């Protein structure tokens, strides 16, 4: 070190300069670190929470989709009854979910192996804003979590509603739906989404091909089987198609369901993560489109005419199919899953008619059959190598066995206690008059036999 | 201090090391403080503004909900007329709100006590992006504020539309609705949301149980009273129920209104504050669900049959009820408020029929009666100890007196000047033919007397 | 410098203090700079991407709007056919957009002048999360970009669907729509949005008055011309109005389209920029409202009765009109553009009837004529001085020439190869029975001649 340098560094003037510099640097550091106002992390949290609430209202509107789909695909004499059931289900579904469902599905601790747990009755948020926010690792508040999941809950029971339409006794169905949505759905759900045994095992169901759709579908199958077909559906001279009374309604229904699916699948990311949510939008859309085209072509070939109901159901088939793996599929796989779902749904509809399971709206074919397909498809197409076909199959079977047993026991008990089917006279007259004392279209002349 | 230490600290090499360290620390501090790119505060602002615009389009879709609800609950011969009125109201409501309403409702300064102020005609945004943003304390831009409030404005007049359906003269109603939405609603609104005397007093109305729903409801009551009942509604042999012509439409309407309410209440937080918006989603939903179940049970008991219209109106009753206090209620209180609203609405419908106020869609029962209930409920259940029952009552009465007087004077003046009711012949024939020269369902055979 | 100061600064104790201070300042600086967790820039990106996905599902629901609008404005015997076409179009439109459209519209490099380019078949995202995000300058991911644009794509073909309703041969239309949406729309679109020659020239079309609406409208004009009018529409005794079969449906359709337009225009900002998106909400809404009132008044004067269909089309006219310049208009200009559009649409409907171009839903008047008006209006009212009327006119003409030639060649080739119109018998019977073998309203008695 030369003399000049040594002097310079030793100079008291330099030292004098050092003091404010160090102080300023220190203060700047403190200021930047203290970050007045919100942090970027909080800003992302706000955006995440906005997205989860948007997803919530999108799932809500699916219930209108179910209502119009089911109402439109059945006869005008049962319209009020269907609308009534669907209005009831969302109200009862959300309230019971607040009372028991949410804490059955996300019990925290399981008391019976990894099969059952209950965090106590009624929802209760962590104290204060911080608790609400810290709750779910930056994705959403406690309230958002509850309300998003609550919107899902009622869906499972709504799926049953379509399959039992036009002949089920109203009060019996309301009781069944309440028990199904309050206990069966959340307990089954806890096995995967609540961190239970299937989750531990590596079973994957992103947004509910199995947990929501096949659970609803199994319930639909059991109830439709116990109820038996509508009068005049299966005759000695063959299957009589009973067509919907106002086809704009199912079109409205399917488009609204498709719309809602952007929340159903998009919200299942559980944050607004741009990469995942946008991928989910793409896979969800492509599967729906592929389902439409596949069902259209197949129905055109099979029936010699392009069938609107089946084509619309093709969209739902594709949507149910992609739901289990919407975040782990390439767009190409999504198209393939949708195409297969669209083919499956047409043959499933034909199959259930052949074995005389009368499902007025095709709910079993759409939600159960395509729900199974979608869950297994994760084992085939997932970009995540941890997903395995065998584990997926175990999940499918486990949900099937549990739901079938529960639905069977509940619905049979109700059947024994109070009956599940309206009288023949009431069915012929229509449930609107016999159950509600009103007509859905009193100003219009209807076909005499209606 | 030992010799070694003293030497070390005095060493010019150490001093040499200090210089870049200090400089680097200084530069880092500057860089962090200068924060290139947006601040976290701006990021939160963007998310807030996104949410407020989402809330805006949700409130917009409520107008379709009103249109289908009202059209479906009335007769097929008046369908075009109802759809026309509702289309007109949103267009006229928003334009007049731009011209005078917004600046009457948010005058900044009041020129007549705290009762009336006007910031001049037409909307005009602060200069530049900064002005737009600084405008509302980080929640939204000036434009967002205007358009969100504008969507609310037309609602009040739409509520009236339902109560006067099937007999009001079109041109007279259009004039009434224009004056009501351009002047009555925003002046009344300024008392609370514009910072007027009721705001000063501590009156609380979060999203408009009183400011929107009861204002609309009082207008509906006055107009229905002045108009008188529909021909054939109240006869010597009792009350003749005049039922809706297509029940899927009110179901669509109620679900869309419920959907829109997530924006109506959720947007009234005036930011995307995660804690508040998510709580509002929960309270809003639970109140609606409780309203559905209460109205269902009560109507089932009273009418011996479960009534779809009343059950649907139960949802609206719960929603109107929770609106005044959606952000200051526990979920439990929300359920209670919804239950009470659902009971009230059924008996209110019966009551107004008994006193021969003919309200085809139950608008007065839903919006006025449950609006009052919801406003008073804030005085009972609010988690904010500043809210008082007496102040809430004063607000309810003040809005009632003002709106009833205004609506009465306006509608009576129109009655004197040009009449408010179609001729008996026109009413029997239906307003679609008599006012619009068209039928809503020309392809369908209708019941002769229709 | 006095002795004390010199001693102080030279003191080893001070130096001892300096070491941790410097170190601490350094660490604080590093910490603040390193910014653990997300940056504010990322937070804005998340909010932007959320908004673009919201805009995506809003544009999606426009397809339900088109479906119900068209179904409601035509006769009940063609309802299934219309719903079927619209379901097909969205599915096929999005799939072909994934296969070729997106890469034709945004080719990156143009291979034939600035007129044509193709980035290869099928969508493929940049690698990894960073690639997805870096992709579009902070507004949205690659997937978001694709899915938002894909929702737009099908719109152009849907517009054609309305104009050819009630007489077009289903299979022929499906082929035409597929080619139109897969090739004509994206190639034309690349000229502006893909950075092609019209973009270079300064042509401005914010959200597609020309690129989407007039392209669809020209296609509609050509196809309606080639097809000829419906049987019985133009008779020796004059024009016979063929009215819609269920007026609630077009009301639902127009409100859903209006709703969707908040995504169509709002999403065209390509970010959640608070200033621009909120301005776009205001201009879009005001233009729609002005269109409603103008069409209402003009139709009332011309027809002596207020016409619901025309009033509803007035909303669409205003929306199409504002679309080209929604981000560069003052609210006042937006009202003016909407008013003019509302007047234009009524006279355009009359004009096309006079020259016997039969357009059952008024698609040509709404989308083509008001699309041209909106594009030219940018040259008149834009707040951006770079926009020029002449350039806008060149754009309008260029799109007109290209689309008319393409549509004509494609539809004529299909006509020659397989015919484009159903037989007279099939048309009279209705396309629902003749093409689909089903009725849309089997439970209702329909007017014999239907």
Image: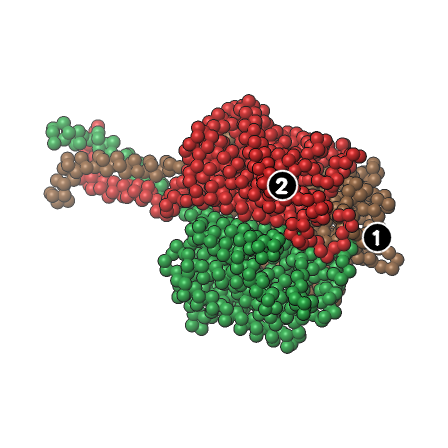
Chain colours: A red, B green, C brown
Q: Is residue B138 left or right of residue B168?
A: left
Residue A362 appears anywhere in the view: no
Report helix, strand or loop for mark 2.
Answer: loop
Q: Is residue C339 above or below residue B424?
A: above
Q: Please identify the quadrant where the N terminus of chain C is shown.
A: top left
Tell me the CA gap for discs 2 and 1.
43 Å
Q: C168 or B322, which lies in front?
A: B322
- Pointer 2: what residue? A420
Residue drawn at x 26%, y 36% is C24
Q: Are the numbered discs 2 and 1 placed on the same chain, yes or no?
A: no
Report helix, strand or loop for mark 1.
Answer: loop
Residue C1 appears anywhere in the view: yes
Farthest-out residue, right = C236
- Pointer 1: what residue? C449
Residue drawn at x 53%, y 40% is A179
Q: Is residue B296 above or below residue A179?
A: below
Chain at tag 1: C
Q: Position of residue C89 (x, y in %)?
A: 70, 41
| Label 2: how many Cα within 10 Å (few below 14, some 14–19, many 20+) | many
Residue drawn at x 27%, y 41% is A26
Q: Position of residue A369 (x, y in %)?
A: 63, 31
Q: Position of residue C153 (x, y in %)?
A: 65, 42
Q: B345 or C355, which lies in front?
A: B345
| Label 1: how many Cα within 10 Å (few below 14, some 14–19, many 20+) | few
Residue drawn at x 72%, y 70% is B424
Camera-near label (2 vs 1) is: 2
Chain at tag 2: A
């Amino acid at each position: 070190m030369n003399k000049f340098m040594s002097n310079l560094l030793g100079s008291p003037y330099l030292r004098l300069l050092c003091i404010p510099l160090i102080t300023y640097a220190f203060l700047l550091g403190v200021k930047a670190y203290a970050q007045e106002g919100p942090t970027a992390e909080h800003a992302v949290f706000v955006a995440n929470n906005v997205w989860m609430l948007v997803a919530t209202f999108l799932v809500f509107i699916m219930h209108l989709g179910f209502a119009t789909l089911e109402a439109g695909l059945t006869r005008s004499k049962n319209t009020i009854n269907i609308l009534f059931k669907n209005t009831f289900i969302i109200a009862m579904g959300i309230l019971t979910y607040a009372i028991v469902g949410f804490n059955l599905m996300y019990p925290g601790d399981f008391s019976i192996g990894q099969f059952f747990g209950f965090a106590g009755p009624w929802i209760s948020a962590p104290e204060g804003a911080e608790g609400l926010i810290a709750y779910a690792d930056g994705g959403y508040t406690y309230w958002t979590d509850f309300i998003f999941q609550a919107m899902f809950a009622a869906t499972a029971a709504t799926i049953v509603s379509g399959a039992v339409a036009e002949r089920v006794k109203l009060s019996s169905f309301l009781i069944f739906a309440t028990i199904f949505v309050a206990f069966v759905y959340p307990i089954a759900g806890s096995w995967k989404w609540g961190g239970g045994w299937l989750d531990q095992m590596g079973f994957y169901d992103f947004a509910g091909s199995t947990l929501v759709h096949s659970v609803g579908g199994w319930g639909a199958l059991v109830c439709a089987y116990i109820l038996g077909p509508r009068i005049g559906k299966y005759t000695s001279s063959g299957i009589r198609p009973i067509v919907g009374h106002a086809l704009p309604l199912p079109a409205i229904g399917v488009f609204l369901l498709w719309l809602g699916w952007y929340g159903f699948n998009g919200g299942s990311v559980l944050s607004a993560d741009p990469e995942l949510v946008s991928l989910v939008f793409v896979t969800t859309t492509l599967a729906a489109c592929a389902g439409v085209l596949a069902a259209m072509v197949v129905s055109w070939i099979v029936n010699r005419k392009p069938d609107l109901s089946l084509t619309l159901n093709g969209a739902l088939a594709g949507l149910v199919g992609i739901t289990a793996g919407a975040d782990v599929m390439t767009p190409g796989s999504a198209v393939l899953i949708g195409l297969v779902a669209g083919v499956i749904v047409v043959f499933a509809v034909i199959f259930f008619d052949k074995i005389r399971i009368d499902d007025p709206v095709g709910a079993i074919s759409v939600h159960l059959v395509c729900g199974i397909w979608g869950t297994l498809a994760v084992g085939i197409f997932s970009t995540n190598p941890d997903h395995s076909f065998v584990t997926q199959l175990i999940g499918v079977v486990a949900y099937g066995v549990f739901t079938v047993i529960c639905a069977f026991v509940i619905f049979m008990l109700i059947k024994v206690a109070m009956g599940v089917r309206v009288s023949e006279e009431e069915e012929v007259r229509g449930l609107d008059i016999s159950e509600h004392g009103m007509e859905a279209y009193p100003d219009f002349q209807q076909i005499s036999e209606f």
